[in-house]
Image (cartoon, grey):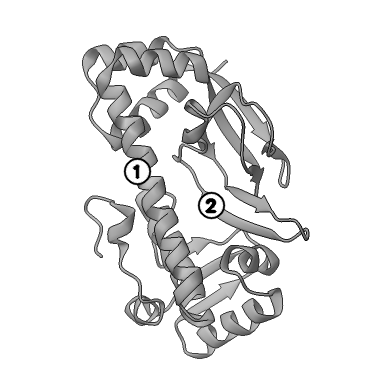
Amino acid sequence: MADAAEREWLERQIARRAPLSNDGQMALRALSLVTRTYEPSQYLLREGDRPKHCSFLRSGFVYRHKIVGNGGRQIVAIHLEGDFVDVQNILLTESDHNIQALTMTKVLCISREDLVAVSLAHPSLARALWRESLLEASIMREWVANVGRRDARSRTAHMLCELAIRQEAAGIGPREAFDLPMTQEQLGDALGLTAVHINRTLKSLEAAALIARSKRSVTVTDWHGLQRVADFTSGYLHLPDVDH
């Protein structure tokens, strides 16, 4: 079971989406909350599973992906600390994609039935979860536009900008230096590119003095230059107090 500190953390994360009423806060605190950990590459959920709980990401990185008929993988979302990993599972009874850990991961789990019941009884909590689903859809639209209409250099730079801003907003670290816990193959599967193309593209961004890499971390040496290459503005993330 999760301790008081984890419950307070979860309450703060949900309240970031929308303010909670006093009754909503009390109802959230009363929910049964279970802590689970996952190893890198371990599945949190597989396509076709019937989920019993919903998960909030306490630490680490996870990704959501689809496997198509020829065995190819398309990564459709990356989640980091503070994200609600599977908001769609509140109401959908069968998972239509896979959720897998990128790193050592810790999640806080709430029974989906309990979360539905408390959301129906407390509109402020329902509004916070509704807003979460809208934010997720906004990011998905940008990912579709990125993969569909930007060239390889721009879409790779765009992914780097997004991860930098999201980690900064989550309090993980500044945008100028952030974790990139993905292999080049995984980046390619998120961006519709081969690992070879990703490698070449990252080297071109380094050669242009926009970034520097060290193992699984990235240092942004020219933020505005990287933004220009990426055609990136952060408005679609709907983050308050962020310089677009």
Q: Which residue is mark 1?
A: 134
Farthest front residue?
A: 69
- Of 241 and 125, the residue lying toward us: 125
How many residues crowd mark 2 within 10 Å: few (<14), some (14–19), many (20+)? Answer: some
Q: Which residue is mark 2?
A: 78
The answer to which of marks 1 and 2 sits earlier in the sequence is 2
Question: Which-is-in-front pick, marks 1 and 2?
Answer: 1
* Residue in view at x 31 percent, y 12 percent: 121
* Residue in view at x 46 percent, y 63 percent: 144
The N terminus - image quarter: top right
How many residues crowd mark 1 within 10 Å: few (<14), some (14–19), many (20+)? Answer: few
Disc 1 element: helix
Report which quarter residue 234 is drawn in: bottom left
Position of residue 58 relative to residue 126, above or below, is: below
Q: Position of residue 107 (x, y in %)?
A: 56, 32
Q: Position of residue 69 (x, y in %)?
A: 75, 56
* Residue in view at x 47 percent, y 13 percent: 114
Q: Is residue 103 left or right of residue 125?
A: right
Residue kind at label 2, given as amino acid type: Ile
Q: Is residue 32 left or right of residue 121?
A: right
Question: Label for residue 177?
Answer: none
Position of residue 117 relative to residue 103, above or below, is: above
Residue kind at label 1, given as amino acid type: Leu
* Residue in view at x 57 percent, y 68 percent: 191
